Amino acid sequence: MPPCSEGRERTQEACVTTIKRPQEIFGERVDECVNAAKDKFETAVRPIYGSNDLARPEHIGSSTLLRINDVPHLLTAAHVVDWNKHTSIYVAGENNLVEIEANFFSTMPTIVMTTTMISHLQKYLGRWQRGWGM
């Protein structure tokens, strides 16, 4: 009996083709990519902690460890760094929390929106949402 081609399996009578819907194929591919990214970058994503009123760790955000031109960097959101005004902040190390003692740089300051700004933004988004059938 001749061998089955790729994507087919041999049964007693003949080769059988497995038919999948595009959504199944897409879902399988997404799973493959997510797992590959997790395997590659999982150790680079680290939680950030502050110290609460009882001097206990409190999770306040996450970070990503990067190496750029052989210089280590820690990337996190500005609201996480803002906690450093009120408490020391720590990143999860291999076995314990490590205090972050560094200079922080931000690409944009925090934006405080007034109620007028929010109202204008809602009107603007409302027009676009209606256009999208939302």
Image (spheres, rainbow, N blue to C red):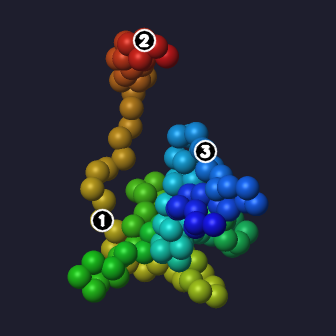
Residue closer to the observer: 72 or 110? 72
Residue 73 in the image: state x and y as whole percent. 35, 76
Answer few, some or many: residues within 10 Å of disc 2's Cα (few below 14, many 20 plus, some between 14 and 19).
Answer: few
Which residue position holds label 3?
19
Which residue position holds label 2?
130
Q: Which mark is residue 123?
A: none
Q: Name the N-terminal-most of marks 3 and 2.
A: 3
> How much space separates mark 3 and mark 1, taking CA atoms?
52 Å
From the viewer's perspective, is the residue at label 2 or at label 1 nearer? 2
Residue 134 in the image: state x and y as whole percent. 49, 16
Residue closer to the observer: 7 or 27? 7
> How much space separates mark 3 and mark 2, taking CA atoms?
39 Å
Residue closer to the observer: 31 or 58? 31
Q: SS of the residue at dot 3?
A: loop
Residue 13 in the image: state x and y as whole percent. 73, 56
Q: Residue at x 53, y 73 (%)?
A: 39
Q: Name the N-terminal-most of marks 2 and 1.
A: 1
Q: Name the N-terminal-most of marks 3 and 1.
A: 3
Answer few, some or many: residues within 10 Å of disc 1's Cα (few below 14, many 20 plus, some between 14 and 19).
Answer: few
Residue closer to the observer: 107 or 113? 107
Tag count: 3
In the rendered image, which quarter contains the N terminus?
Answer: bottom right
Would you say residue 72 is visible in this rendering? Answer: yes
* Residue positioned most to the right: 12
Q: Residue at x 46, y 13 (%)?
A: 133
Which residue position holds label 1?
105
Q: Residue at x 63, y 85 (%)?
A: 96
Q: Amino acid at mark 1?
A: Phe
Q: Is residue 57 above or below residue 32?
A: below
Q: SS of the residue at dot 1?
A: loop
